[in-house]
Image (tube, rainbow, N blue to C red):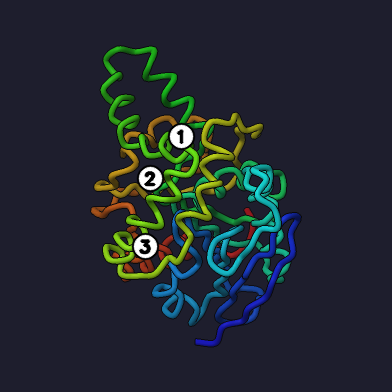
Amino acid sequence: MEEERRTVIRPGATLAVYSYGPAPAPGIPTILFVHGYPDDHTLFEYAVPALSTDCRVITYDTRNAGASRTTSKKLDYYRLPALVDDLFAVINAAGAGPVHLVGHDWGSIQGWAAIQDPRAKERILSFTSISGPDLGHLRRWFKQRLRRPLLWPQALGQMLRSSYVAFFQLPVLPELLWRKFLTARFEKFAGRGIGDNGVRGLALYRANSFRRQQLSGRCSVRVQVVVPRRDPFLSPRLVDGVQEWVPQLEVVEVDAGHWWPPEHIRSFVQHLRNWIAATGTSPQ
């Protein structure tokens, strides 16, 4: 499998971008993978060989993950608008036509913001969200449940699942825990290396988790939400209400945990192939 690597220069960051498969051409689907935390582009490395036989596949290390670097520690460089600009810059730099966007975890959160951007109409054919909610929807979801006592258990359950987000806001201690304990444990559990991504990616949470984002709330992109039933961090009920602002929505449940893409490679690849075949290669 031949790999093309390029560096994309962005305000406050340099991004490592990787491309595989046939050159962009009419009728050749292009898939853009965006990884989450604490991963880098290698999250998808086992799916790339199967998909790049007849698809153009692009992956990249989001800012300050993997081989990408930031030139400043200012949290402004980690906020969603900067991350969305990175995503479109990668599409442009790779010379890709409209892409099938696939995001996992924080990559999915970035994807939700990207499909609400006016540029999405011409640059994104479809969006596959895996284990990463839209932050605006997440806030609305909590508000709706807190107004209805019968739904308080749902809200409480998700608060417990998300308690690590509050912990990540603390200074020093999360970094220390990652260096002394969590990195080795994660790598043993996942069977892949993450280097210091756990420490470097904490800025994502500190820059975005409790900040209101100015997004349109409108989506013209075809979306599928993949819901792993055994995700310890996200309740399957978080998808409730998404159909109110995403007209072209499909929801698929899978019997898997949070890291469905690398742990169930065959089903992940086949699912994407079916989705791309149904969506096509041209904007609607």
Type of amino acid at the residue the image marks with label 2 = Val
The relative height of residue 122 versus residue 165 in the rendered view (above or below) is below
Along the line of sight, the residue nearer the viewer: 190 or 101: 190
Q: Label 2: how many residues lie within 10 Å, few (<14), some (14-19) or many (20+)? A: some
| Residue at image point 55% right, 58% down | 101
The mark nearer the N terminus, 1 or 2, is: 1
Type of amino acid at the residue the image marks with label 3 = Pro
Where is residue 253 shown, x and y percent of the image? 30, 48
Along the line of sight, the residue nearer the viewer: 239 or 27: 239
Q: For residue 163, which quarter of the picture?
A: top left
Is disc 3 in contact with disc 1, using a CB cutoff of under 8 Å?
no
The residue indicated by pointer 3 is 261
Where is residue 34 shown, x and y percent of the image? 53, 59
| Residue at image point 49% right, 32% down | 137
Q: In this view, does 64 lie to the left or right of 244?
A: right
Type of amino acid at the residue the image marks with label 1 = Val
Where is residue 22 shown, x and y percent of the image? 59, 82
The residue indicated by pointer 2 is 251
Of the two numbered discs 3 and 2 in the rendering, the one whose residue sits closer to the viewer: 3
Q: Distance between the residues labelled 1 and 2?
A: 10 Å
The numbered disc on residue 242 is: 1
The mark nearer the N terminus, 3 or 1, is: 1
Q: Could you tell me if residue 225 is visible in this image?
A: yes
Q: Distance between the residues labelled 3 and 2?
A: 16 Å
Where is residue 273 shown, x and y percent of the image? 43, 67
Q: In this view, does 251 lie to the left or right of 223?
A: left
Q: Is mark 1 on a helix, strand or loop?
A: helix
Q: For residue 30, which quarter of the picture?
A: bottom right
Is disc 1 in contact with disc 2, using a CB cutoff of under 8 Å?
yes
